[in-house]
Amino acid sequence: MARLEGKTAVITGAADGIGHAIAQAMAREGAHVFLSDISDAQGERCAAQLRAAGHLADYLHCDVAKADDIARLVDTAVRQTGHLDVMVNNAAIAIGGMPVHEMTDEQWQRLIEINLTSVFRGCKCALPHMIAQKSGSIINMASAQGHIGLDGWTAYAGAKGAVMAMTRQMAVEFGPVNIRVNSISPGTIDTPMNDRLARQIGGNLAKAWVKMHPLGRIGKPCEVAEAAVYLASDAAGFTSGTDLRVDGGLTAAPRYVPELL
């Protein structure tokens, strides 16, 4: 039997990159996946491709900066399937590559809204349903940047560090009602977001990313997706409050600061 047979999974930021890979992997494992994003044409196309392959998939527009959008996403999934088993708070943006004193308040607020407040909102909406059914798995996307320092990424690292702290707290608080809460910290992954970032910053960034990872390459979205499937599955039934590093050894290595110019 598929590892997620009969489960309902909601994934934010699922039109491309890691979120898309998680939706694909969970659908293949038998889950009814509810993909969400602000890139509607791309998200609809992803869901249609999954349905064409015989999987259960729906797409809903969701701007995670809007509390009502997240609530509607979760409520729709529960209304259609009767339960919510997996909540993946994946949506994020990359604002950085600058000293923290050069970041504007607007940039800070936008990053925190998308990378941290949206995780709070996703958990807030998912938890009442999971508490009622006395089961559930919440997976929050953190980052290797929450573990190690890299010039220019103070705000991003702060948001992701907070995600990990929230994850641990919720694991303790809701463990007694059989809800597991974990996070994943990817290293540099081959995603459209990172591709845009490499073009924006330029220099030797792409080569530096490879050099930073002891495995000698950056990661693939499907490798992060496999970690998410594990955390969502019954195989991880005794795994809660942990941060799973899918980072090619990045955070185990001596600190390396790339020369970007």
Image (cartoon, helix red, strand yellow):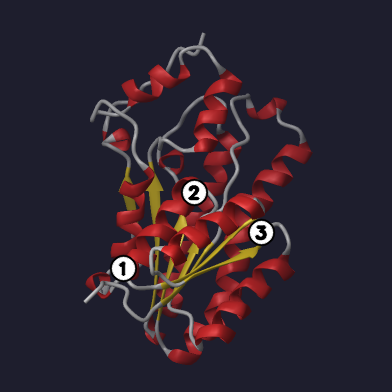
Task: Give coordinates of residue 153: x percent, y percent.
Answer: 55, 32
Query: Can you say whether 173 is above or below 158 in the image?
Result: below
Residue mark closest to the camera, 3 vs 1:
1
- Pick the front one: 191 or 201: 191
Please indicate whether residue 39 sits to the left or right of residue 256 in the image. Answer: right
**Between disc 1 and disc 2, whose residue precedes?**
1
How far is disc 1 from disc 2 in space, using C-alphas?
30 Å
Mark 1 element type: loop
How far is disc 3 from disc 2 in space, using C-alphas?
19 Å
Looking at the image, do the residues carrying marks 3 and 1 touch, with CB atoms under 8 Å apart? no
Residue wearing tag 1: 29
Query: Can you say whether 187 is above or below 34 in the image?
Result: above
How far is disc 3 from disc 1 in space, using C-alphas?
26 Å
Check disc 1: other Cα within 10 Å, few if <14, some if 14-19, many if 20+: some
Residue wearing tag 3: 64
Looking at the image, do the residues carrying marks 1 and 2 touch, with CB atoms under 8 Å apart? no
Please indicate whether residue 241 sits to the left or right of residue 92 in the image. Answer: left
Residue name at image x 55 percent, y 55 percent? 45
| Residue 257 visible somewhere in the drawing | no
Which labelled disc corresponds to residue 161?
Answer: 2
Please indicate whether residue 80 sits to the left or right of residue 179 in the image. Answer: right
Q: Quadrant of residue 128?
A: bottom right
